[in-house]
Image (cartoon, rainbow, N blue to C red):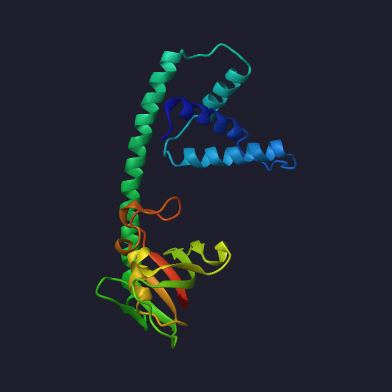
Amino acid sequence: MRQPTSVGLASCLVAALSACGSSPQVDLESFERKSSYAVGIDIGRELHRTAIEFDLPSLTRGIYDVFDERELQLTDEEMAEVLRELSAKTQLAQAQRREEMLQQNQEEGDAFLAANGKKEGVITTASGLQYEVLTEGTGPKPAATDRVSVNYRGSLVDGREFDSSERHGGPATFVVNQVIDGWTEALQLMSVGSKYRLAIPSELAYGENGSSPVIGPNATLIFEVELLEILQ
């Protein structure tokens, strides 16, 4: 959460952008319009994360009063007090939403893992990691301290893709024991040339912290990983 004055400004700005209601398409030919739209997206995402409902007409009125240099309906002291209360309410709402996400993601992840673990070809290890061999390679297996090159695709249990090596222009390289625990375990099971599908419980991934903005707290993650080579 930003400082109260920044929250107020952001709220007014996003209200002005939202005042049209139906959010019609805009002409983004000029840099001024593109930059304005980009700022609107950034502010909209920030305020969406606050979990607070805003009264858009009032917010719009605030920004117009400032730009039209009208007399403001709140004193600086009143505004500061209101924004302090808004900040406190925002923090409470975010905490409540996080608790809801923790429980929901845990339940969805547990249900997915329970069903996935019953599928033919899926192996569940002692840690809870699940893997399915899509292609079995014939090369060596990496040690925990080896640097490897891999192609991968990561998705949530609902199928939404959140990352892939293709997005970053090609294979990823890293040391085996410097990634999430589920990857560290799985890669040491794989021979070079192998391709596995992994289902990684949250405790072997990003746990209760998640990895914002896409990977929520307690999220179970699905990866397709192809081990290309062990680097010298």
Q: Where is residue 192 in the image (x, y as percent from the top left)?
A: 44, 82
* Residue at image point 70% right, 36% down: 32
Q: Is residue 127 visible?
A: yes
* Residue at image point 33% right, 49% down: 100
- Please identify the quarter of the rendering in which residue 85 is found: top left
User: From the image, which quarter does the N terminus lie in?
Assistant: top left
Up-down relation of residue 56 to residue 149 (above or below): above
Q: Position of residue 200 (x, y in %)?
A: 35, 67
Q: Position of residue 181 (x, y in %)?
A: 32, 66
- From this viewpoint, which residue is outermost toward the bottom? 138
Q: In this view, does 56 lie to the left or right of 174?
A: right
Q: Is residue 227 left or right of residue 114?
A: right
Q: Can residue 200 be seen in this view?
A: no
Nearer to me, 220 or 188: 188
- Please identify the quarter of the rendering in which residue 39 is found: top right
* Residue at image point 43% right, 51% down: 212
Up-down relation of residue 197 to residue 207 (above or below): below
Q: How many labels does the image show?
A: 0
User: From the image, which quarter does the C terminus lie in?
Assistant: bottom left
Q: Where is residue 67 in the image (x, y as percent from the top left)?
A: 62, 20
- From this viewpoint, which residue is outermost toward the left? 126
Up-down relation of residue 180 to residue 115 (above or below): above
* Residue at image point 55% right, 33% down: 14
